[in-house]
Image (spheres, rainbow, N blue to C red):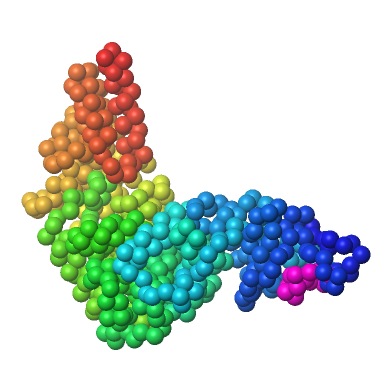
């Protein structure tokens, strides 16, 4: 609701959209919702205007949508909903009733959003009065902004328009990210759409948008690209558009204009601006860790050093320093060799080297290890869009579906992996596991025996052999073949070089069928203790077995 302070004054048709601050020629002030008194016009853009308003003595900012296009209204409403949910000192606060509509004199709705007013100036204006920032300030500001992005991305949103004008510094030195008009929610539908190359809304600022965003396919890593470009501006005082690019790599040639920073920090910013999203850091926490290394002067490794693993349901093998070094060098070669092709945009990348798909698969594996399944799915599906024959990506995408209990789609990906590479034993193992879950025990036993035959006499297969034998013992246990189950489970435990607990849980069940209470209790204790040490995502059956172990051990715990 709004009205003129003097009811006798004639109301103009649309005072806010016309940019007027009074609602009649006698100078009465405009009052909205019986509380917000318009004070002055602050600025205007393509779709809206911003005003300063007084709310019972507190100054706030009023955003008004001036063009009621359906898409503009949708984005405006989404901005309001996101800002209502987010609570962080680096994000303008919007109260539950901060979004409302007002009917103008012409009867047209005027969409309004009232938010916290940040008392300070944006970083573009800040730099006009100051010199390019030092390394110390760059690290401090990067930390502040990454904490904001971490909050935003964890809430499953990304900003899509980070640039110096949309970052403000308040009088206490706190940076605040503003203008969430382009914010986007990460949903399953959105992921499927961008992988299918359907264009989304093309929003952003020239010089700060990555290629995938130009194509309407932005993602959280797009925010990191814009962040890197923002710091190029802050460290050099020049727009990113003022710098040329290396024709072979596509990298911005800017480092010589920022002699005040270390090579390590420059490398990190270059990684933020990698032409392809799969080559940028996975998340804000990874970047913060690298910043800490920059501060302490320690060597900074790239984020893509985890090798492609074939882990099945058994977890991922411990990192091997030699393999990590080789993988890091290979990642660098991929960046140098194909970055020129990346300039063609995502559609052109489909014709690029399958090595890019390998890098994307590796990035997805990092996301999977960090339990960020949506991000892992993005990278695996991009990898398959570039190289449909990438067996590892099919298998790993199956793991993502498996963890979501989407067994039908998991099975489809495992089957593709096995069809395209008949000796891909990991797929045999996981297909058998799904058969056990669906009580197809004989089929599972046959599949697992084929898998064991394929790796017979092969070296360095202990992890995989453990998984196959464990599942074979499980299938026999469910089938009622208790002696065979015990044999296979005991054999599985011999191949366990760490603290895998599933075979111990299953063996405890097998021993209980033989009335070996003492032996079963010992295995339940090992099962439970090892389960507490395991940091991987447990499967539903593993959660069930852990709960059984805890129940079996309760009488002993109570007695103690």
Is 330 situated above or below 519?
Answer: below
| Front residue of 439 and 526 | 526
Identify the residue shown where x is 30% and y is 72%.
270
Identify the residue shown where x is 39% and y is 81%.
238
Q: Quadrant of the C terminus?
A: top left
| Front residue of 76 and 49 | 49
x, y percent for residue 33: 76, 56
Identify the residue shown where x is 29% and y is 44%.
536
Question: Visible in this render: residue 70?
Answer: no
Q: Which residues are magenta?
A: 13-24
x, y percent for residue 3: 82, 61
Residue 101 left/right relative to 308: right
Residue 40 left/right relative to 338: right
When asked about the image quadrant of residue 472, the answer is top left
Total count of labels: 0
x, y percent for residue 498: 16, 40
When asked about the image quadrant of residue 346, the answer is bottom left
Question: Visible in this render: residue 304?
Answer: yes
Q: Is residue 303 magenta?
A: no
Q: Quadrant of the N terminus?
A: bottom right
When asked about the image quadrant of residue 141, the answer is bottom left
Which secondary structure type mostly characterizes the magenta part of the structure?
loop
| Front residue of 517 and 26 | 26
x, y percent for residue 523: 21, 27
Is 497 situated above or below 17?
Answer: above
Identify the residue shown where x is 82% and y is 72%.
13
| Front residue of 299 and 320 | 299
Is 40 situated above or below 87?
Answer: below
Residue 526 left/right relative to 122: left
Q: As drawn, which residue projects farthest toward the top?
A: 559
Residue 109 left/right relative to 81: right
């Amino acid at each position: 609701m709004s009205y003129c302070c003097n009811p006798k004054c004639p109301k103009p048709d649309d005072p806010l959209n016309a940019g007027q601050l009074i609602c009649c020629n006698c100078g009465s002030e405009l009052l909205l919702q019986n509380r917000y008194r318009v004070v002055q016009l602050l600025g205007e853009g393509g779709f809206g205007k911003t005003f300063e308003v007084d709310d019972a003595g507190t100054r706030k900012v009023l955003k008004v949508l001036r063009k009621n296009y359906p898409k503009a209204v949708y984005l405006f409403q989404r901005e309001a909903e996101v800002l209502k949910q987010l609570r962080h000192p680096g994000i303008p606060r919007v109260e539950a009733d901060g979004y409302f509509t007002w009917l103008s004199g012409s009867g047209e709705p005027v969409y309004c959003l009232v938010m916290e007013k940040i008392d300070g100036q944006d970083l573009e204006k800040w730099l006009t009065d100051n010199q390019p920032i030092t390394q110390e300030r760059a690290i401090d500001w990067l930390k502040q902004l990454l904490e904001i992005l971490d909050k935003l991305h964890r809430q499953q949103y990304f900003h899509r328009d980070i640039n110096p004008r949309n970052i403000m510094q308040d009088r206490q030195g706190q940076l605040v990210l503003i203008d969430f008009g382009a914010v986007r929610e990460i949903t399953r539908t959105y992921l499927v759409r961008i992988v299918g190359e359907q264009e989304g809304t093309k929003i952003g600022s020239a010089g700060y948008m990555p290629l995938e965003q130009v194509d309407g396919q932005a993602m959280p890593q797009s925010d990191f690209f814009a962040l890197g470009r923002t710091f190029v501006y802050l460290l050099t005082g020049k727009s990113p558009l003022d710098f040329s690019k290396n024709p072979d790599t596509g990298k911005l040639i800017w480092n010589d204009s920022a002699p005040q920073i270390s090579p390590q920090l420059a490398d990190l910013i270059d990684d933020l601006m990698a032409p392809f999203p799969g080559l940028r850091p996975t998340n804000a926490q990874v970047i913060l860790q690298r910043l800490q290394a920059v501060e302490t002067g320690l060597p900074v490794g790239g984020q893509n050093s985890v090798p492609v693993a074939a882990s099945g349901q058994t977890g991922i093998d411990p990192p091997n320093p030699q393999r990590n070094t080789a993988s890091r060098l290979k990642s660098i070669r991929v960046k140098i060799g194909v970055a020129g092709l990346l300039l063609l945009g995502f559609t052109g990348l489909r014709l690029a080297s399958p090595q890019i798909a390998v890098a994307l698969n590796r990035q997805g594996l990092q996301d999977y290890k960090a339990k960020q399944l949506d991000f892992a799915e993005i990278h695996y599906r991009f990898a398959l869009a570039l190289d449909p024959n990438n067996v590892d990506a099919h298998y790993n995408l199956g793991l993502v579906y498996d963890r979501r209990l989407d067994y039908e789609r998991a099975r489809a990906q495992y089957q593709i992996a096995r069809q395209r590479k008949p000796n891909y034993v990991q797929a045999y193992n996981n297909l058998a596991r799904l058969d056990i879950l669906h009580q197809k025990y004989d089929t599972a036993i046959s599949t697992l025996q084929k898998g064991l035959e394929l790796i017979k006499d092969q070296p360095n297969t202990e992890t995989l052999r453990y998984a196959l034998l464990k599942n074979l013992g499980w299938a026999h246990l469910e089938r009622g073949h208790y002696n065979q189950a015990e044999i296979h489970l005991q054999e599985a435990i011999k191949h366990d070089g760490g603290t895998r607990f599933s075979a111990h849980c299953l063996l405890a069940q097998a021993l209980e069928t033989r009335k070996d209470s003492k032996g079963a209790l010992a295995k339940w204790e090992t099962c439970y203790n090892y389960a507490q040490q395991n940091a991987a995502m447990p499967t539903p059956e593993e959660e069930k077995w852990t709960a059984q172990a805890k129940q079996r051990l309760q009488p002993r715990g109570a007695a103690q």
